[in-house]
Image (tube, helix red, strand yellow):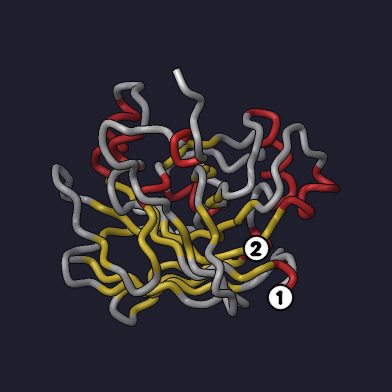
Amino acid sequence: MNAPTSAQNLAPAYIFAPAPAVSLPVQDETARFAVSRIFCVGRNYADHAREMGHDPSREPPFFFMKPASTIVSDGGHFPYPALSKDVHHEIELVVAIGKGGNNIPADQALSHVYGYAVGLDMTRRDLQSEAKKMGRPWDTGKAFDHSAPCGTIVPATKCGHLAQGAVVLAVNGQIRQSGDLKDLIWNVPETIAYLSTLFALSAGDLIYTGTPSGVGAIVSGDVMQARIAGLPDLTVKVV
């Protein structure tokens, strides 16, 4: 048998075309941020923990995941999902990881951050509540299609590392959620450090850092505008 004569002959064959890469725009850049995995921190603001009926004490953080394919970019549409009658908005600071690692010390964690964006952790609250009661995973309530809207990423070299600033979510112009990044139970360096003990982080990972109080239901036709001081707004319409 003759040896392959070109790199093309060495390219893998697929039964069907691979899914397209998921990426996000970067402010003032033509190159885009390729998304790998999405990690989300649960109940990371004391006021939100209380509104969900939980103790807001500083217990170790916990995480759940969403597929990269759930990303919706700024100006996009959020199709109201099937099998739910109670879908909620949750505005969150998103941390974009630019350098991987595991067991990252908290005092070195910010060197692994590429940038920041505004995100929405959309939640089928009724399905999540049902899963909680039955002791089942949250995937149907959290990891469904289009459940991770995310805005334009701003490199940390431009916006700095965000430790405080207003977090506001409005629906149809009416403010629903209002908080401040300084009220995170686990701040960004601590979150990265802890998460890196559970997973080896890699460039392209996103971390949704938790939501303040005021989460609530949306309906078809609503326009959600999410704003965090120092970052571009994220606007998404429910369809």
Tell me the SS state at disc 2. Answer: strand
Q: In this view, does 135 lie to the left or right of 55?
A: left
Amino acid marked by disc 1 = Lys
- State yes or no: discs 2 and 1 in contact (Cβ < 8 Å): yes
Residue matched to label 2:
115
Count of residue discs = 2
Which quadrant of the figure has residue 57?
top right
Residue 158 numbered mark, or none:
1
Quadrant housing the N terminus: top left
Tell me the SS state at disc 1. Answer: helix
Seen as rendered, the residue at the extreme front is 2
The alpha-carbon separation of the residues under discs 2 and 1 comes to 9 Å
**Residue 32 x, y percent position in the rendering:** 53, 64
At 32% from the left and 59% from the top, the residue drawn is 216
Quick one: label 2, few (<14), some, or many (20+) residues within 10 Å?
many
Seen as rendered, the residue at the extreme right is 107
Residue 47 numbered mark, or none:
none
Amino acid marked by disc 2 = Gly
Quadrant housing the C terminus: bottom left
Which quadrant of the figure has residue 134?
top left
Q: In this view, does 115 lie to the left or right of 238?
A: right
**Residue 213 x, y percent position in the rendering:** 47, 58
Quick one: label 1, few (<14), some, or many (20+) residues within 10 Å?
few
